[in-house]
Image (cartoon, grey):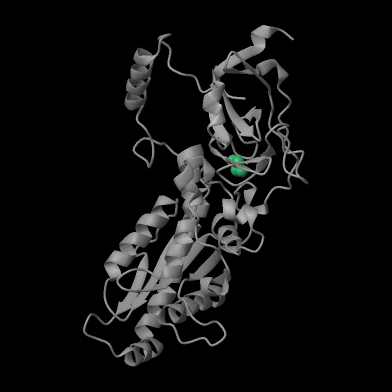
């Protein structure tokens, strides 16, 4: 083994200060560890989804990835017990004249065990069959002792009309009946830490939001979302779901991969007090952002305004109103008609032009940043992203 493979990565004393330190050997990212007086060096790039192991922490003898907690032995690079096949390269180290050297020629192989793919990860292709309508109820209630909900009642009417009169398949998901975790902010660590399928869905078999993901991405042509107005906004459960849907939008941002194609969304919004237009504005903005189309007049709503606090009467009006019943049925019909138009139109794009879309850096800005980087570099070259 030639000495030329040894890279000086810095003063050994600097690497003794922390248990895990990120380092570079040329362009290779490394995670250097110091544990019980011993140095270790493994790749700085996690085998799972590329997380920065050098920014992780030591858990016993294992470096824990800061993104989704996969662990690698600090000396061998092998995965934690039971997952040894999920390994990152490890490198020999030595200290010479107070400097820490890493032998890049000593790298072991990166390996990823064959994990069964999550069913949601399959290609988002519409299965043949008649149009399919998914209703999503976002109102919260004691499921064991259900109460009358105006938004649920209108959603039920819309779905019943879709099934009986429009002869489409229907499904209803009530968020109140699902156990699902709040979004834990993987996106806040890094856009690439927010994965599709959702990181929580992949890690937690008890999390039930996979039913919503399955319905939205793979099954439905039409999604009817019903929400009450709570303090001028959609329901807390609605927002809990929407935060978890960030992973659908993020696929466009990080991979230009459009998961929602040729699908229609429409909304039912009811509340004791007003703020219908703000709630509708949010819903239209969010569902448009993840790729849904809308029929003409994409929502129906009912509110008796600021001064009406007699909720019992509000419920009676919704129960007895032929207008609202007819409105819910017509909303379902408009949404299904629109879905049929889209399905007739045929293929929908799997990618989209990124200019002007969320988190797209203009080429002009990129060129300026690269020029600034090159001007600051001793070699006059912008840094490369080469990685092992
Ligand atoms: S655990 Fe490292 S990227 Fe997911």
Number of numbered discs on residues:
0
Up the image or down, 3 lies above or below 99; here it is above
Q: Quadrant of residue 96?
A: top right
Percent x, y of residue 354: 40, 36
Residue at the farthest left position: 307
Residue 149 as seen in the image, left or right of residue 309? right
Up the image or down, 316 lies above or below 191; here it is below
Percent x, y of residue 227: 41, 72
Quadrant of the displayed image that contains ligand 1 = top right
Q: Quadrant of residue 81?
A: top right
Quadrant of the rendering where the N terminus is positioned: top right
What residue appears at the point 68 percent right and 38 percent down from the top-left corner?
72
Percent x, y of residue 20: 57, 35
Asked whether the viewer can see residue 12, the reply is yes
What residue appears at the point 70 percent right and 16 percent down from the top-left corner?
105
Percent x, y of residue 220: 55, 61
Asked whether the viewer can see residue 337, the reply is no
Q: Nearer the viewer, residue 167 or 306?
A: 306
What residue appears at the point 37 percent right and 91 percent down from the top-left corner?
316
Up the image or down, 187 lies above or below 144; here it is above
Q: Nearer the viewer, residue 348 or 180?
A: 180
Q: Nearer the viewer, residue 278 or 332?
A: 278
Residue 80 as seen in the image, left or right of residue 69? right
Up the image or down, 77 lies above or below 243; here it is above
Quadrant of the rendering where the C terminus is positioned: top right
């Amino acid at each position: 083994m030639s000495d030329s493979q040894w890279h000086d990565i810095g003063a050994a004393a600097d690497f003794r200060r922390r248990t895990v330190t990120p380092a570079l050997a040329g362009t290779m990212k490394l995670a250097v560890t110091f544990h019980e007086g011993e140095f270790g060096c493994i790749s700085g790039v996690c085998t799972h989804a590329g997380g920065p192991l050098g920014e992780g922490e030591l858990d016993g003898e294992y470096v824990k990835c800061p993104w989704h907690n996969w662990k690698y032995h600090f000396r061998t690079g092998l995965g934690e017990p039971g997952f040894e096949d999920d390994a990152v390269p490890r490198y020999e180290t030595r200290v010479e004249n107070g400097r820490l050297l890493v032998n890049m020629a000593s790298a072991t192989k990166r390996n990823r065990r064959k994990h069964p793919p999550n069913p949601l990860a399959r290609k988002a292709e519409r299965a043949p069959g008649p149009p399919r309508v998914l209703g999503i109820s976002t109102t919260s209630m004691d499921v064991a002792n259900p109460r009358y909900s105006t938004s649920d009642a209108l959603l039920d009417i819309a779905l019943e009309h879709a099934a009986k009169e429009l002869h489409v398949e229907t499904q209803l998901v009530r968020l109140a009946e699902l156990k699902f975790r709040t979004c834990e902010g993987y996106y806040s660590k890094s856009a690439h830490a927010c994965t599709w399928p959702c990181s929580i869905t992949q890690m937690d078999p008890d999390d039930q939001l996979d039913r919503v993901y399955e319905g939205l991405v793979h099954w439905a042509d039409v999604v009817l979302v019903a929400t009450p107005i709570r303090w001028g906004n959609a329901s807390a459960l609605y927002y809990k779901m929407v935060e978890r849907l960030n992973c659908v939008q993020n696929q466009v941002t990080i991979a230009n991969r459009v998961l929602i194609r040729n699908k229609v969304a429409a909304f039912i919004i009811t509340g004791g007090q007003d703020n219908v237009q703000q709630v509708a504005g949010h819903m239209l903005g969010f569902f448009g952002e993840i790729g849904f189309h809308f029929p003409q007049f994409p929502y129906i709503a009912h509110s008796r305004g600021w001064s009406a606090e007699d909720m019992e009467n509000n419920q009676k009006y919704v129960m007895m109103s032929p207008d609202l019943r007819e409105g819910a049925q017509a909303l379902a019909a408009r949404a299904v008609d629109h879905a049929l138009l889209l399905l007739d139109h045929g293929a929908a794009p799997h990618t989209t032009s990124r200019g002007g879309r969320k988190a797209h850096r203009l080429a002009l800005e990129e060129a300026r940043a690269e020029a600034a980087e090159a001007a600051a570099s001793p070699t006059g070259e912008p840094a490369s992203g080469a990685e092992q």
